Amino acid sequence: ELPQHLLELPCFFNSYSNGKVAVRCSVGPPGEEPPLPLGVHGFVRGNGMELLELQSKGPGAPVILHYANCGLRHWTEKYATICKGHGTSDGAFCRERPGAASLRAHLAARELTLRGDTSGLERFYRSFIMGDEFGELGYLAQAGAVVRLPTVQLRIAAASPAAA
């Protein structure tokens, strides 16, 4: 649980507190099968043996873009799915698991979903997930805190059904 003085700090990560996992597709000698997923947070070698794990932290560490909430429709569908059938008193995912308290955007989306507040979910998404309800991205770009990645934008546009 976070100390009280940290509860009031801005939360810049709105999906995960445990990070994400990436894997090289060729990890062994030529001809070895590629790694296989082991749940949603890991991989094993094609023969089931463990992989060498490296932590990637600090300046100069590789960065992988992860769009956990790509689009309002996908985001609302995700929360509609994870807010039922969990065996908790209200059916939604458990708020008591380690690290859950630090994911305030995740908990707020849970509450809005349980209330069935469609307009509140959309306002919340635009303000806190997209981060541009009031023109914040332009301000952050001027300060050098965000960058536009046109290649990502072009690839997403090319892959969308509307582009076909």
Image (cartoon, grey):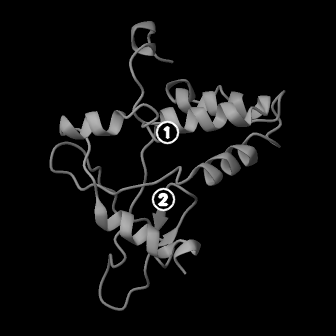
Give the crowd class for mark 1: few <14, some 14-19, many >=20 residues within 10 Å. Answer: many
Q: At label 2, which amino acid type do we have?
A: Gly
Q: At label 1, which amino acid type do we have?
A: Ile
Residue 131 in view in this figure: yes
Left or right? Give the position of 155 relative to 96.
Answer: left
Q: Based on the displayed image, in which of its 4 quarters is residue 97 positioned?
A: top right
Q: In terms of depth relative to the viewer, which is nearer, 50 or 112?
A: 112
Which residue is at a point 58% across and 32% down the rendered structure image?
124
Say the numbered circle drawn on residue 42.
2
Q: For the residue labelled by badge 1, is the local secondary structure a helix, a strand or a loop?
A: helix
Which residue is at a point 54% across and 26% down the rendered structure image?
104
What is the x, y in percent for residue 63? 28, 54
Q: Which residue is mark 1?
A: 129
Residue sticking out furthest to the top: 4
Q: Based on the displayed image, in which of its 4 quarters is residue 6 positioned?
A: top left
Q: For the residue labelled by badge 2, is the local secondary structure a helix, a strand or a loop?
A: loop
Q: CA distance from mark 2 to mark 1?
A: 26 Å
Give above or below for 88 relative to 149. above
